[in-house]
């Protein structure tokens, strides 16, 4: 039972929300179509690398460094959860 | 690949036509009509800085996205013969607007028939962040607008190790590119030369909507007689929001969209992805980034401290606290000087001239004006602080730290900008709420912003606090009066957020709110901008408020000096009769006469009518007069008080404070007890006493519902709170 739920967990796609501070990931896809429009405009295109730069004092929002330029984007954790990462 | 077909073959000839030398051969624009040139670009890319450089005007500049929220025009002398009208616009990330400020751009660009339609656009691009900035550029180019690319912030790009091959990029993009620095004016001369030429539409296109969309696009294009396919595609995407289309037009597009099964959201997403792919190709050959230890962004390091779990809030609170200390403690020295100056002039006039006009001048105009001038140091300091917060980029960090907290109260991190700038003035603050995408968050923000104590309340606060709060140090460094002032600001702030919470529960509509925001890098404030802001704001305060205050002071003086029929003579006769009976001293008789006369005057009549309603709050008819006059604008309070209490008083009774302190109640005790003063203070914290605010709320919400609710709510809150304060403490 417990091993199964653990398996479900590892299979669930990781999102930007799950990044650790300073960790980078590559965007695989955007889950929420409406929000995706805004995120795409801001440069969060599938295939782009993002790095979790900082968290606000209360844990939300967070800032990401998008692409290999130093452009910083801030967004809420709930929004970050819609940005899925490639393994 | 399909994309390859989009790239039109760059010939050497086309490319060389873009160099500055070759541009001299392009015919200049006709001199007769004014060319209309729009500045369009991403938020915070330097459009307003550029606008100021071109026009010599002082449009507000600040280091966070969304400073400019409305269009503003100015005239620029491009060459000796050529003048152009320049339009500064809000920033936008794409031609698909997500908020009201962004919609200003599409409103301008969709209606080619409009007489506001620009002949030409200057696209500002932040060179240090070129990939994201080019997205908007490629969209504008595809609209077929003649354009020049102002490649701004070259200094920042160099610092971050970004090298751009301008010539190669110019070939790829098909428009002239001028590298520049809008902050210090580098590149402006070259830009002006290009802007004075008659340029054709861009020679490249960057995106082709799929062939399957062509039938629909063409029908829209021919029906509305549009000059290009891409514009027609935008009509299909956004027809519901386009304000100049008639219901029939919208129905027509609606049918087409239905018929061809056009799905706006996935199409828009795909377009953005395709454009970025194209931009990546272009940048591959034109931009190189060399990262070294040296240009590791210092902003991140500063943020480690300024947005730290503990330090972040402590520093923010410290900054605010310093602001109030400055406004109260530091400003008192220059205020003293101004005060002495006004008194000196007043006495000079009174000793050298005589007659009724002199009384009007000293008791009416000078008393009212003195009430304005003395607050210049406080207003200047307040605006200086806010300008520095905005110019450094700290404001964006504050929205970041506050979002979580604000959300609990039905607001949004972005509400912090209106709330903080509401401390200066609610009118621009309410307009800045346009950047909030979510309707409910925005309405709530607009509704509660006037509860933040604006600079027009400073005079009221200063005078009354000085009257009842002792000037003592607390904890060694702070000043008790400064602490009291901060208390009033906090009271306004808490009223704002708790009102927001109540509204959040009342407004049932739920639409998605998001907080996806660019984080600007820290910058040193440009001191010249800070200086200009201070001068502009002080000028506006002195002249606009001054005009109203002087006008009202004069009217008030007349109303206070004359009464219906011979009421004033009767009052005087009455006092003299009593005086003879009671053996008053001559001085006391004079004071009684002045006071009785004022009471029988027109002004006294108005105040008396209001008195029964405000008596439970501890106010008398004199305060009633001040409440009436400050209904239009609260800064009139001090002028009114100063005029009312001057009538018939000694000329050497100097400041408003002294006049108020000398005021006695019926038992001969000081009238302004702490209970009365605090009741009045609380009233001014909450009451909606500003016509300009009501007007701007009407404009921003497009109706009378919200301004009227606001008026009722705030006035009600003020009345009830004052009532409680006075009844508890009297
Ligand atoms: N280092 C540097 N800073 C610049 C340059 N141009 C503008 N700035 C700064 O960038 C910030 C934003 O400038 P604005 O002119 O307000 O930008 P904007 O495009 O009008 O911004 P919005 O109105 O918010 O869309 C300000 O702090 C400017 O001082 C530049 O060339 N170099
Ligand atoms: Mg601007």
Image (cartoon, coloured by chain):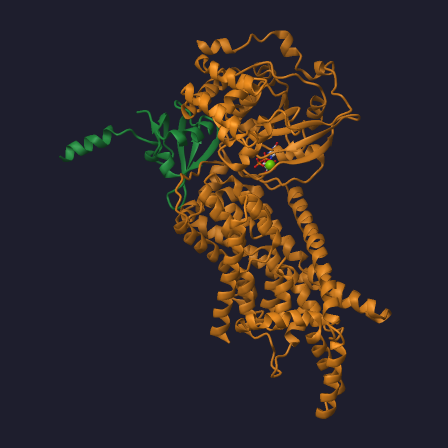
Chain colours: A green, B orange
Q: Residue at x 40, y 51 (%)?
A: B506
Q: Residue at x 68, y 40 (%)?
A: B58
Residue lying farthest to the front in this orientation:
B248
Q: Which of B293 and B208 is in front in this view?
A: B208
On screen, residue B554 above or below B234 = below
Counting from the top left corner in percent of width and height, residue B357 is at: 83, 67
Q: Quadrant of residue B438?
A: top left
Counting from the top left corner in percent of width and height, residue A87 is at: 30, 25
Which of the four quarters of the rendered structure image does ligand 2 lie in? top right
Residue lying farthest to the left in this orientation:
A1
Q: Which residue is drawn at 75% across and 75% down?
A: B650
Q: Residue at x 71, y 81 (%)?
A: B592
Total marks shown come to 0
Counting from the top left corner in percent of width and height, residue B511 is at: 40, 40
Q: Which of B678 and B322 is in front in this view?
A: B678
Counting from the top left corner in percent of width and height, residue B596 is at: 70, 79
- Is residue B291 in view from this perspective? no
Q: Which of B286 and B99 is in front in this view?
A: B99
User: In the rendered image, which quarter contains the N terminus of chain B?
Assistant: top left
Q: Quadrant of residue B455?
A: bottom right
On screen, residue A23 above or below B436 = above
Q: In this view, does B372 lie to the left or right of B410?
A: right
- Is residue B580 in view from this perspective? yes
């Amino acid at each position: 039972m417990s091993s199964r739920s653990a398996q479900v967990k590892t299979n669930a796609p990781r999102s930007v929300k799950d990044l650790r501070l300073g960790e980078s990931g590559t965007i695989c896809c955007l889950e929420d179509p409406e929000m995706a429009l805004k995120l795409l405009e801001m440069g969060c295109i599938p295939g782009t690398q993002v790095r979790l730069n900082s968290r606000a004092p209360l844990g939300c929002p967070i800032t990401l460094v998008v692409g290999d330029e130093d452009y910083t984007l801030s967004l809420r954790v709930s929004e970050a959860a819609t940005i899925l990462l490639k393994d | 690949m399909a994309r390859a077909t989009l790239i039109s073959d760059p010939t050497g000839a086309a490319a060389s036509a873009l160099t500055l030398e070759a541009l001299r051969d392009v015919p200049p624009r006709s001199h007769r009509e004014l060319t209309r040139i729009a500045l369009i670009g991403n938020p915070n890319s330097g459009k307003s800085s550029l606008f100021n450089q071109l026009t010599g005007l002082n449009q507000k500049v600040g280091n966070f996205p969304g400073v400019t929220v409305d269009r503003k025009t100015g005239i620029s002398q491009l060459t000796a013969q050529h003048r152009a009208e320049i339009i500064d616009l809000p920033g936008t990330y794409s031609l698909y607007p997500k908020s009201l400020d962004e919609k200003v751009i599409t409103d301008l660009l969709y209606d080619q028939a409009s007489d506001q339609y620009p002949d030409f656009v200057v696209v500002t691009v932040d060179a240090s962040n070129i990939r994201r900035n080019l997205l908007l550029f490629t969209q504008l180019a595809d609209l077929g607008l003649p354009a020049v690319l102002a490649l701004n912030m070259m200094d920042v790009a160099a610092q971050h190790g970004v090298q751009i091959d301008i010539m190669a990029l110019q070939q790829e993009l098909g428009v002239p590119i001028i590298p520049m620095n809008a902050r210090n004016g580098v590149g402006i001369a070259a830009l002006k030369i290009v802007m004075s030429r008659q340029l054709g539409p861009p020679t490249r296109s960057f995106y082709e909507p799929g062939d399957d969309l062509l039938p629909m696009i063409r029908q829209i294009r021919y029906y509305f007689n549009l000059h290009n396919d891409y514009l027609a595609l935008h009509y299909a995407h956004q027809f519901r929001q386009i304000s100049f289309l008639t219901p029939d037009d919208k129905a027509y597009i609606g049918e087409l969209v239905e018929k061809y099964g056009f799905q706006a959201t996935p199409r828009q997403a795909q377009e953005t992805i395709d454009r970025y792919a194209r931009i990546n190709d272009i940048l591959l050959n034109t931009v190189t980034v060399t990262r070294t230890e040296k240009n590791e962004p210092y902003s991140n390091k500063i943020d480690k401290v300024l947005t730290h779990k503990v330090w972040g809030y402590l520093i923010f609170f410290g900054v605010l606290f310093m602001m109030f200390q400055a406004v109260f403690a530091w400003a008192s020295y220059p205020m003293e000087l101004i005060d002495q100056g006004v008194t000196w002039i007043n006495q000079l006039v009174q000793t050298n001239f005589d007659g009724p006009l002199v009384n009007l001048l000293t008791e009416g105009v000078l008393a009212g004006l003195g009430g304005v001038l003395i607050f210049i140091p406080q207003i200047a300091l307040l605006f200086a602080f806010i300008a520095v917060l905005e110019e450094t980029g700290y404001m964006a960090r504050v929205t970041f730290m506050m979002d979580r907290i604000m959300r609990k109260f039905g607001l949004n991190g972005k509400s912090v900008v209106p709330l903080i700038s509401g401390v200066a003035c609610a009118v621009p603050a309410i307009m800045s709420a346009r950047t909030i995408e979510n309707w409910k968050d925005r309405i709530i923000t607009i509704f509660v912003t006037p509860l933040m104590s604006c600079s027009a309340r400073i005079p009221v606060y200063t005078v009354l606090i000085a009257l009842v709060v002792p000037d003592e140090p607390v904890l060694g460094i702070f000043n008790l009066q400064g602490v009291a002032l901060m208390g009033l600001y906090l009271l306004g702030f808490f009223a704002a957020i708790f009102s927001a919470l109540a509204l959040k529960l009342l407004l049932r509509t739920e639409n998605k709110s998001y907080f996806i925001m660019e984080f600007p890098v820290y910058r040193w404030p440009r001191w010249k901008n800070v200086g200009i802001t201070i001068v502009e704001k002080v000028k506006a305060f002195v002249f606009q408020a001054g005009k109203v205050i002087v006008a009202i002071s004069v009217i008030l003086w007349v109303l206070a000096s004359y009464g219906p029929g011979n009421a004033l003579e009767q009052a005087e006769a009455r006092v003299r009769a009593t005086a003879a009976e009671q053996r008053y001293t001559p001085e006391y008789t004079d004071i009684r006469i002045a006071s009785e006369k004022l009471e029988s005057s027109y002004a006294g009549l108005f105040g008396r009518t209001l008195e029964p309603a405000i008596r439970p709050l501890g106010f008398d008819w004199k305060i009633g007069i001040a409440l009436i006059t400050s209904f239009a604008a609260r800064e009139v309070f001090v002028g009114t008080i100063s005029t009312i209490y001057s009538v018939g008083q000694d000329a050497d009774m100097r400041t408003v404070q002294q006049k108020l302190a000398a005021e006695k109640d019926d038992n001969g005790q000081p009238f302004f007890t702490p209970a009365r003063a605090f009741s009045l203070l609380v009233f001014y914290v909450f009451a909606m006493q500003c016509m300009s605010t009501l007007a701007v709320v009407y404009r921003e919400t497009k109706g009378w519902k919200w301004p009227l609710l606001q008026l009722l709510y705030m006035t009600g809150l003020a009345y009830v709170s004052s009532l409680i304060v006075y009844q508890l403490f009297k």
